[in-house]
Image (cartoon, grey):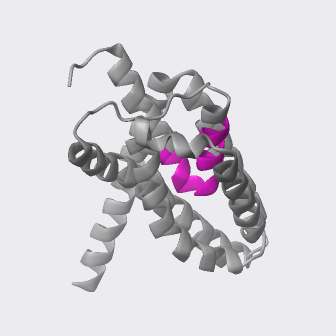
Amino acid sequence: MEINIETISAIALGIGLSASAGFRVFIPLLISSIASHFGILELGENFEWMGSVPALICFGVAAIVEVLAYYIPFVDNLVDSIATPLSVGAGTLLMTSVFPVENEWMKWILGFIVGGGAAATIQSGTAITRLMSSKFTAGTGNPIVSTSEGVAATGISILSLITPIFVGIILIVFIVIILRVVYRKLLKKKKQEL
């Protein structure tokens, strides 16, 4: 694999789309599908199905159902438990679909590690935010959290198509911050148990 600006851009695009799947699973899939359908996004050879009309319909319906489910207090916490593994799958698929590597095994492994990892990290951060909102506002603040997550998923997905390297850098910094916060919380919890 030759490292050039196109490769770096494709990796950054994959990170942006994958991280967006941590906010909402199906919005980045829908945006990628629309972009592919209209020739804005070039997907890998085995992923051209993502730009088909049936895929557009499926992703569209799934995105609408997902967005609406997040507006029901406490149901949104239940949806988070389902969304976590789905976001890893979506992140892996999105990263793998744009990753410019010929070796299929390498493409999927790196897609899972980078794309699935980015989606899982963002999803963990949003789940913690939603739980805290449920705890401190009795669920009344959750629609605000849901709206901001939907906007983030849409905005980051679209920006990733326009300026992937910039978005990729910002998301890497954001992911590192989330990981540090989670690590500190785990350390604090472990100290309290001792």
Q: Nearer the viewer, residue 36 or 124?
A: 36
* Left or right: residue 53 compared with residue 157: right
Instruction: Give the position of the C terminus as an image quadrant.
Output: bottom left
Image coordinates of residue 83 in percent, x first then y, are 54, 68
* Left or right: residue 87 compared with residue 24: left
Residue placed at 62% from the left, 55% from the top?
Answer: 26
Instruction: Give the position of the N terminus as an image quadrant.
Output: top left
Image quarter of residue 60: bottom right
Q: In this view, does 1 lie above or below 20?
A: above
Image coordinates of residue 128 in percent, x first then y, are 52, 67
Residue placed at 68% from the left, 52% from the top?
Answer: 54
Image coordinates of residue 81 in percent, x first then y, are 53, 76
Instruction: Give the extent of the magenta segment.
Output: 18-34
Q: In this view, does 23 lie above or below 98?
A: below
Residue placed at 66% from the left, 55% from the top?
Answer: 59
Image coordinates of residue 39 in percent, x first then y, are 62, 25
Q: Is residue 37 above or below residue 185?
A: above
Residue placed at 49% from the left, 26% from the top?
Answer: 164
Q: Nearer the viewer, residue 151 or 18?
A: 18
Residue 23 in the magenta stretch? The answer is yes
Q: Is residue 141 visible?
A: no
